[in-house]
Image: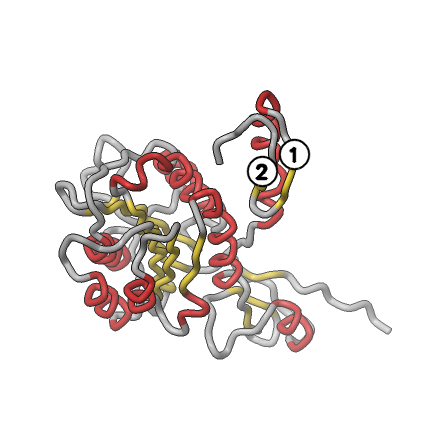
Amino acid sequence: MLPQEGGDLTCEGYPYKYLYPRFFFCHMLCLVLLIPAQRSFCNYSIDLALVLDGSGSVTPQWGLVEQFAVEAIESFNVSSSAAHIAITEFSSGEPPAWVICPYPRPPAGCGLMDDKAALITMAKSMFNAGYGTAIGAGITVGQGALYSGALARPASQAAKVLLVLTDGNNNFPPDPVAAAQAARAAGTVIYVLGVGHKFNQTQLQAIASEPTSEHLYMADDFTGLLAALHNVTAHLCASWHCVDNSVCLQGPPGAHMVPLDVCRASCPRPHSLSHPLAEALPTPHAE
């Protein structure tokens, strides 16, 4: 949000009064203290592609898109055993969509990465392509990143998730609904975040996984991106199950998953905490 002389500013729902010289300090205080406090954290095996709208309408807000990408990366335990993440940008330029790579491009190509620092560096220096909106191309390339490359894992070993961000209506082939249907048929879960008031809500509903109430989120403008992202990760990172009658493990949402407090209450006393992604449950003291 651009500062004006006096007035109200909200930082992800937290209002504060400010004068222009204080804007930078207040904004940085929000980024350092308030946003991390709302952040959910996913600590399980997931292959995630961020599919970001790089069309011309996004250009004036590109810094906020970069901030969105950084916050998304920070919400996951990016490591060899947990989250692998790819960043995909789409527009109607040439090519219409691509997986963003570190430069120079590594010999093996690019896609999913398990190096959080490298991903954040990339997210902070993304090139905004401009032109039109090619959501279908973004979904197709993002889906390809989830299933190809050195760090792509079988669906049986890692959840496959696309997080699509757009502010507009698709105006370039391929058909985004058909691309989404193909991705979902392959086992990918698609979350969609629509920004502003120019996107086609019917189209986004057809792209998102069911139920859309849990996979389609809206933000009135780009200043609300992080609040919407926190709603996405709150859903992605809130599911647990008891393994071997000993540990609660986090995992993707599903019928057999429960909130952490329910898992803690139902999981028997731990006898082994060897799993690298386990939450250690305290052993009760003897009566």
- Tag 1 secondary structure: strand
Indicate the position of residue 120 as horizontal and vertical percent values: 41, 38
Q: Contact (CB < 8 A) between labels 1 and 2?
A: yes
Q: CA distance from mark 1 to mark 2?
A: 6 Å
Indicate the position of residue 53 as horizontal and vertical percent values: 29, 47
Residue indicated by mark 2: 9
Indicate the position of residue 121 as horizontal and vertical percent values: 38, 33
Question: Toward which corner of the image does residue 35 lie, by quadrant?
Answer: top right
Which quadrant of the rendered structure holds the C terminus?
bottom right
Residue at horizontal 53 percent and vertical 59 percent from the top: 234
Q: Is residue 222 visible?
A: yes
Q: Amino acid at mark 2?
A: Leu
Name the residue nearer the viewer: 177 or 97: 177
N-term-proximal mark, 1 vs 2: 2
Q: Is residue 43 visible?
A: no
Q: 284 above or below 107?
A: below
Residue indicated by mark 1: 17
Q: Badge 1 local density, few (<14 within 10 Å), some, or many (20+)?
A: few
Q: Amino acid at mark 1?
A: Lys
Name the residue nearer the viewer: 5 or 47: 5
